Image (spheres, rainbow, N blue to C red):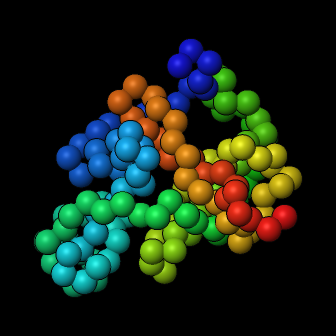
Amino acid sequence: MADQPFRVLPRLTPETEPFWTGGAEGELRFWRCQACGYWLHPPAPICPECLSKDLAVAAASGSATVHTFTVNHQPWYPGLEPPYVVAIVALPEQDGLRLTTNLVECEPDEVSIGMPVRVRFERYDDVWLPFFAPAADRVA
């Protein structure tokens, strides 16, 4: 891991641990309401849709589309060399289920809104950070 860029890592809590460690099994995990099926991100103690406390961890498909993005040209962290893409991706499991992430495995000028992407994980200590890369089956 010596060649990995510096990353500010999240503190694991019982609520966030499934999200940050799911990558060990290749899963993008969120809390999901067992009463109505609503996906919660970020985690919450109750479902904002039906107010149920019956929540369980569920794996999302790992597919998404680029909702919006920006190309960062500033060298904010040692080892994280610009330019790099910060994106909000929309997951198909639910309208409004979005995740802020970095896009990897592509040049910034190849990124477009609506582009299909798939999750990729990078391990840092006990945390697996979810990044997204162009989907293998995307149309160029």
Q: Inspect this view and state whether residue 137 appears.
A: yes
Question: Which residue is at the front of the view, 67 or 118?
Answer: 118
Q: Residue 35 in the image: x percent, y percent?
A: 19, 81
- Say which quarter of the image contains residue 76: top right
Q: Which residue is drawn at 71% across and 63% down?
A: 137
Q: Which residue is drawn at 45% across and 78% down?
A: 94
Q: Inspect this view and state whether residue 101 appears.
A: no
Q: Residue furthest front?
A: 137
Q: Residue 122 in the image: x percent, y percent?
A: 52, 36
Instruction: Please tell me whether residue 110 is drawn above or below residue 89 in the rendered image.
Output: above
Instruction: Please tell me whether residue 87 is drawn above or below residue 121 in the rendered image.
Output: below
Q: Residue furthest left?
A: 53
Q: Which residue is drawn at 61% across and 26% down?
A: 5
Instruction: Please tell me whether residue 132 is drawn above or below residue 59 in the rendered image.
Output: above
User: Which image quarter is the C terminus in?
Assistant: bottom right
Q: Residue 25 in the image: x percent, y percent?
A: 38, 44
- Say which quarter of the image contains residue 87: bottom right
Tell me: 114 left or right of 19. Answer: right
Tell me: 33 left or right of 111. Answer: left
Q: Residue at x 70, y 57 (%)?
A: 136
Tell me: 23 left or right of 81. Answer: left
Q: Residue 82 in the image: x percent, y percent?
A: 76, 35
Question: Which residue is at the front of the view, 56 or 76?
Answer: 56
Question: Which residue is at the front of the view, 24 or 53?
Answer: 24
Q: Disc count in the image?
A: 0
